[in-house]
Each structure stands twice: as C-alpha cells, then as structure tokens.
Image (cartoon, rainbow, N blue to C red):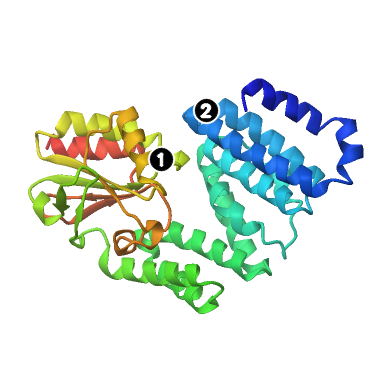
Amino acid sequence: MNRSALTIFVLLLFSPFYIVLGQATVAEVDTTFENYMRSAWEEIQEAEFSDSLQNTYSKEFYYYYEENSESETGEKALAQAFMMWGNTGKSDYFKEAIQTLDYESELWRMIILPMSNIYARNEELDISDYYDLLYYLSDNLEDQKSRSEVVLALLRWRSTQEDKKNDAVELARELVEMNAEEFYVNQGLGYLHEFESLNIGQKAPDFELQTIDGEYISLSSLKGQYTILEFWATWCGPCIPEIPHLKSLYEKYRDDGFTVIGISLDRDKDTLVDFIAEKDMPWPQIYVTDGWEAELPRLFNVSGIPRMYLLDPDGVIIGRDLRGEEMVSKVENLMND
C-alpha cells in the first residue's frame, strides 16, 4: 500500500460514514487496521525510522485507540503509539494516554519501557519524574505482569548505579518472588547473575561462536584489543542511531587494537545480512538463532537492546551500556592514552 492509499484509508477510517457503519463490522475493521499498522511499520523501517513518519502514525494510532479503547486492536494501537513516542521522544499525548488506564489494566506492561525512552529523549521532561511514577505504580498496579514490568524497569535503572547495588539486588529478588511469569523470573535471576559475574572490573565470560561470514570468534582470541560487544537487531529503533558511532570508531581504530563484535537478535538471518550490506557495517556479526533465549544473550544478561559491554585488552569489563557521544568519548580517551 503506497502513501496516497494510506492517506485515503485514514480519511475514510475517521469519517462520519465509517463511524456509522463501523458499529456493525468491528471484527472486519479491526483486521483492516491491524494490517494498516503493519504496513505503517514497514514504511517506517524503509524510511530508516523517520521521526516525521512515526509522529504521523503515532497520532493516528492514538486516535484509533481513543475510539476503540475496549478492543484488542485499540490496545495494540496504543502500545505501538507508545513505541513510536519512545523512538522520537514525542510527548504530546502520552500523559493524556496514561490517564485513560486504570490500575488493573494489562496495558501498563506494554508501555513502561517505551515511556522511559520518551522521558530520556525529551528535553522538556525530567527523567526523575519517570522513576517517581514507577515507584508509585509498583505500589498500586493490580495486574501482576504489569507490576513485574515496573519492577524490572526499576531494576534496570538501579543496576547502572554502583552505589545502589543493594537496592538492585532487592528488586531482582522481588521480581523472582512475584513469579508473575517465567520471563520475569528469568530476568530477576539474570540480574542476580550479572551482579555476581558482570560487574565493572570483572572479566567477561568467554564464548566461541560462528559469525555470519562463517568464521569462528571468541573473546579469548581478541586478547590485546579493546572490544565493544553490541547486542542489537535491525528492528530495534534505538539501535539504529548507534551504527554511525560504531562505524566511525571501528574504521578509525581497527588497526590500533580496537574492534566491535555485533550480536544480532534478529528473527531472520537474511534480513540481517541485507541490512548489514546496505549500511556497510564491516565489523564481525554473530546471529543468534534463538533470540533472547540463546545462550550468549543470557550469558550477558541481555533483557533489552541495545545492550553494550566495553572490554579492555584482558577481557575485563570497563564499561556497560554507553551510548552515542559518551561511548565515542570513552573509546577515544582509551585509544589516545
């Protein structure tokens, strides 16, 4: 479906004529709108996650949710609107949107993570307000899976603060003890493993896997080089802006004791190979066929992407989850010492 056809569809969708007839054909209309949402994401990905496209579609998805908040498709539309707001940092509607949710809603589970991106990327918002909201929700949400998502978000935050390790450990234990779903239990156990084995100053666990080019690579074989391990995927909006920074560092320092290893959680290897060729990403890439449940992501406690580890020439962890200019500055300082 091209852009003109999409526009015509949206005009029809929100016309009075649609509203009159829509009452009798809810299932059909929902199916049509779900197809529309899929085509929108395809267009967004082809446009390299264009902010303007995401701003346009997120508004349409939110309007659809307002008119169909009780339907499954309406809930999906809101969740996807939040994902786009998280990608762009757009905050025009999200506060209004969360006021439509009660404490029993399962939708909280789907919007907690993208909401953190909204706060992080919008200069008019204070990230501390987000964490205050999380603590409030952790005490008030009645849906256990949504509460688990909130505790997991708090755990991710506290795990980055060296002086809050005890708080992080308690949150990880709470996640395990809530036992709302196997996924969250595994996340809690994964962080407990991280606190024991993946701290700054500890040696990263070794592995040996085959790259998409058929070569075997291990951490032990990279001894003597500074190494970035980057867990990512082509469908991950926040991963894409990191590519130019990684490319710049790799091209500048690849012959001076620095390398990058990409670990992709993509669902399809051919999509990954085509994307790497299109973006001219020359560093080694590992494709893990089992995604999140594969041994390597679990070994490095990858609960969300992008996830990054910076290792020194002895394989010791010296940085985690550095992004953008912060990552570039850290590597350049190391390479120029």
Residue 140 vertical position relative to residue 260 in the rendered view, above or below = below
Label 2 belongs to which residue? 50
Please tell me how crowded label 2 is: few (under 14), some (14-19), or many (20+) other residues with Cα within 10 Å: some
The amino acid marked with disc number 2 is Ser
Three-letter amino acid code at the position of disc 1? Thr
Find residue 215 and report its horizontal and vertical position in percent.
Answer: 15, 47
Res. 290 image quadrant: bottom left
Look at the picture and state if 121 lies above or below 103.
above
**Residue 134 vs residue 267: left or right?**
right
Residue 314 is situated, as x and y percent measured from the top left of the image, at 11, 54
Q: Which mark is residue 234?
A: 1
Q: Can residue 89 be seen here?
A: no
Q: Earlier in the sequence, mark 2 or mark 1?
A: 2
Residue 188 image position (x, y, % from top left): 43, 70
Q: CA distance from mark 2 to mark 1?
A: 14 Å
* Labels 2 & 1 near each other (Cβ < 8 A): no
Q: Residue furthest right?
A: 20
